Image (cartoon, rainbow, N blue to C red):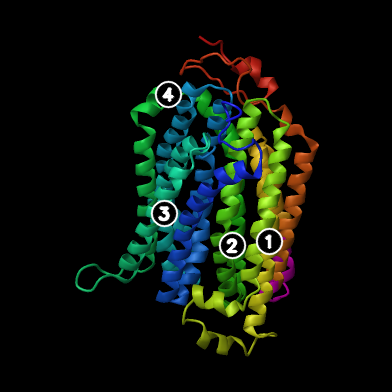
Amino acid sequence: MDNPNSLTKYKQGSIKELWSIALPLMISALASLLMIVVDRCFLARLSLDALNASVNAGTLAWAFLGGFGVLTVMSEVFVAQYNGANLHDQIGVPVWQMIWFSIFSISIFIPFAVWIGPLIFKGTLYDSLQIQYFGYLMLLGPFYPLMTAFSGFFIGRGQTRLLIYIAIIANFLNLVLDGILIFGIKNFIPAYGIKGAAIATGIGTIFQALVLGIIFFKKKNREKFGTSKWKFNFSIFKKCFKVGLPPAIFFALEIIGWTLFFIMMTSLSEVHITISSICQSLVILLSFFFDGLNRAIAALAGNFIGSKKIDLIHTLLKSSLKLLVIFTVIVSVFLVFDPKIIVDFLVPGNLESKIAIWQETLSLPFYSIMKISLLCVFVYLFFHGIRLIFAGLLTAAGDTLFLLLAGSFSVWIFLLLPVYFIVVKFSLSVQVAWILAASYAIILSIIYWLRYKKGKWKDIILVPEKQEAISEDQAPLVLDENTENSEEEEPS
């Protein structure tokens, strides 16, 4: 490699380097997201009610699971910058702080499983099904942030290929368990229905966390990267938390926003929520590319920042946009096909009789509405990808407070309020709601681009200027110039 701190053998910032880091993350993300889609495919075979219930309850559950996961995976930012700054023996310290946070999260997930689910969903259209699905996802929830905390250790150092194999095995495990636990095995295992889908997903996550944890604690990692430095360090925990909390809160608020979106669709008609369920399932399935690209960008940009190679960020940005265009061109081919193919794949055999009833009240043929909605999904995904590219760059620099503020206000101003006052108030069609969703993605991507172009992220400092060895008990992470003198302790 040209540089000892380079994560790959390819030219730094090139499309080949980005692809080599991103591909394993994309496959890993695909395997994880596929768990949600597989759950829905099985539940659609159980009943349309089970499918729609899993969308409402599962989206809200994902707000908390994903929010905690976004926070703990921020260990990758510190791992990346430590790796770029040659502070290898300190890499385990911030990862451990996120492991501790995952353990602390038990005190949040359990109450949510027991009390919050019934409080939120009682009296709704699918209340019993939603309470079951949400409750079991929350009960097994702490294992998800634990898994992502361990993942940050590998992502930040560019060691992402391992995540592929683990995620694929976990996904296969979920697939098998879905069939067994949802429908049961006669005279052997009872049919658990929708809660069986949640349990299967939880077991898949536990498997990933267990395997990654075993590798994290291997002797060579303990010796080289300090993965045995398990002590809770409040100073480092606080700084990890400060960087990770804003994107975590934003993620949770955005997904809660989408939960409200689907609740509004449910309140309008079964057509609205069913089409929205299909559209969201596609968004989830295709998000693997954007999730993997975002994490790869954060890892590479973090290394460039840590090694003082800011000029490579622009090269990385161009490589990212090229990959995004290639992917969206490929995806467009699938989204302009006959939507019946997608519907039959996601909701097999359960819609034809419903469509005949719905058609009496629809202004357009059902599949015409579906096609318009899918085109909106395509536009949404493209600009969502642009937004995540800039989010990855800003996250690597630690500019996460902006992501929280801009994203949180945007989801209300540009998505929820327009949908409520335009679609719900006037009982407009579902395709109008998805046109507004696509507009939301466009506006937010422009906001992120303007922030990147302004360049304030270049002034944020996460690692110390002096690259001496730093003891475990000291706090090497500095968030900005104002806190550098007050919070950084003298190195031993």
- Mark 1 and mark 2 in contact (Cβ < 8 Å)? yes
Residue 420 highlighted magenta (yes or no): yes
Residue occupied by mark 3: 168
Mark 3, other Cα within 10 Å: few <14 / some 14–19 / many ≥20: many
Q: Amino acid at mark 2?
A: Val
Q: Locate residue 435, reporting x and y percent.
A: 72, 67
For image coordinates 53% across by 19% down, the residue present is 475
Q: Secondary structure at mark 1?
A: helix
The image shows residue 283, relative to residue 204, as above or below, that is below
Residue occupied by mark 2: 283
Question: Residue 178: which quarter of the image?
Answer: bottom left
- Spatial separation of the CA atoms under disc 1 and disc 4: 43 Å
Q: Amino acid at mark 4?
A: Lys
- Spatial separation of the CA atoms under disc 1 and disc 3: 27 Å
What label sits on residue 224 in the rendered view? 4
Please state the extent of the stretch shown in magenta in the rendering: 417-431
What label sits on residue 380 in the rendered view? 1
Nearer the observer, 355 or 6:
6
Residue 306 highlighted magenta (yes or no): no
Viewer can see residue 341: yes
251 sits to left or right of 46: right
Q: Locate residue 310, reporting x and y percent.
A: 71, 30
5 sits to left or right of 127: right
Please tell me whether mark 1 or mark 4 is closer to you in this view. 4
Nearer the observer, 324 or 153:
324
